[in-house]
Structures are given as structure tokens and as C-alpha cells.
Amino acid sequence: MPAFHFLFGCQVKGFEKLQDGPYLFISNHNIGSGIEIFALLDSWKKNQNKPIYGLAHRIAFKSPPIRHFMQKIGAIPATFDAAVDILNQGSSLIIFPGGAEEGLRPFTERHLCDLGQHKGFASIAVASKVSVVPISISGNHMVNPVLIRSKLLARILIVPRMVGLTVFPITLGQIFFSAAAFTIFYSHVPLWVTILAVLFIFFHTPLVPIFPARIKIKVGNPLDPLELGQDERYGANSIDRIYNRIQDEIQKGMDDLRLGIDCPQKAP
């Protein structure tokens, strides 16, 4: 994917060191989610010769065109049984537990990993007994900085709630595209048409990149879920321990990327 390497860098390091899986990859999430997902898939394809799948919101599979696209890139509905089945079949799986809440976090929190206490991946790891691999992503929040993330806005606008979002952002991209649409439409069409056009664009541009950015991705070392579940430093029970340790490992990786420690090199 030359465009990704040219515009965003998309430097990925770590897949090359992994042996035969399967693996359960757990990653932080960012506003430029499409970029990081395709960068990961591209790097995985270059370094591994086995299929990989990813959990996606179940609502995406209710529309046939979207379902076809999601299935084509290896997405499966986000259910416990589907995840365990994939891993038991010998394929690897990637999960972004923080979901939209983490992906739409404000720009001021871009260096923080917050998986939102979504601990389902820990239960999946215990049930499947496959190694858990933390993935840290840094720089992606630069592509379309989030100014605010609001639960109230998701309720007021209704549409976000209809598609399963509990939060909705206001980004620089939304402001830019909405202002451009208002300028173009206002002098040519009735005001109500202008308002509808601006709202349509506002709803559909939160994830549209407006800036190039250097995106760095670090794939950590495989961790045994059974050993993680026995580490008493990270919680009262095995699920809490796995969750806390993996979130900690992702945060450490993000800090390393931000400070330039053991960073991936730019792809040729």
C-alpha cells in the first residue's frame, strides 16, 4: 500500500519476530482507525502466511454491502463465541477493546491507552489458551484531531446512537468540511438544503483524514494468558490481571514510540 507509506509513514515493527500462531492481538484504537487497520493487515501479509481476523461492531453486518466489505477484509461480528472459534481454528485475531470510546478520545489524551474496562478479550484468551500480543499505535490522532468527545452529543444527534455509538466527537475535519459545504451550498440552494448537506457531511467526516502523519506501530512480545492470570501485581482475579497487564504493556509501547525508543524504521 504505497499511499499509506507515503502519506502516513505507517511504520510497523514486530510481526516479523512471531512464530506460528495463533495469536490474540490486543491494540489501542485511534481516530484514524481505517489507516491503522490497513497498515496492520499490510504488514501482517508481508511477514506472515496465515489468515488473521478482527472483531467489528455487529451493527456493521446488518447492511449487505458493508457486510460484504467487512468479510472481505477479515472482520467478524464481535461475539465471544466467534472469537474463540476463530482462534481454535488456528487463525489469529486482533481486537481493539477500547472501541469508539478510546478511538474518539480528545487530542489531549492521544498518548493514553484506555481500554475502557472492556475485559472480554481476557476471557477469550483464557478460553482459547493462545498467546496474547499487545500492539501499541502512536501518531494516528494527528490525522484528524478530536476537540471533544461527548456522550450528550451522541444522544442529541440521535444518529450516533442508532449506529451503536455511545459517544460522538467534534473534530477539526468535521469543522473544515462542514464549513466548506456551507460556503458552497449557501449561495446556490435553499437554506434547508444547505443545513441537510452540512449535517450529512458532519456525520460522515469524523474519520476522514485531513493531515498526513507519521504513524508508528509496535507489536509486542507474546504473553501466556495463564501466566498473566497468576501475576498478583495486576489485580484480584485472573481476568483483571490479564486486562491490567495488557493495558500496561500497550501503554509502555505507546510511551516508547512517543519517546523514539525502539521505534519501527520507515518502510522502503
Image (tube, grey):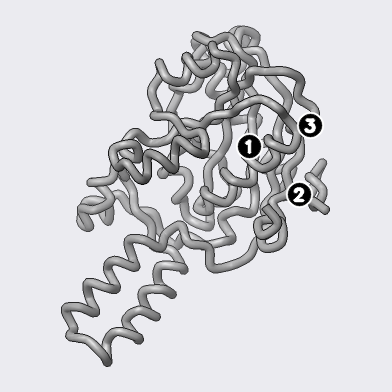
Q: Amino acid at mark 3?
A: Glu
Residue 199 locus on image (x, y percent): 27, 68
Q: Which residue is mark 1?
A: 251
Label 1 or label 3, whichever comes before in sequence order: 3
Quarter of the rendering containing residue 41: top right
SS at circle 3: helix
Q: Nearer the viewer, residue 37 or 135?
A: 37
Give the amino acid at mark 2.
Leu
Pointer 1 local density, CA inside 10 Å: few below 14, some 14–19, many at least 20 = many
The residue labelled by disc 2 is 259
Label 2 CA crowd tier, 10 Å (few <14, some 14–19, many 20+): few
Nearer to me, 53 or 218 = 53
Q: Residue furthest bottom?
A: 187
Task: For marks 1 and 2, give the CA distance.
Answer: 12 Å
Judged left or right of residue 136, residue 169 is left
Q: Which mark is residue 16?
A: 3
Left or right of 36 in this view: 20: right
SS state under label 2: helix
> Is 4 positioned to the left or the right of 209 in the image?
right
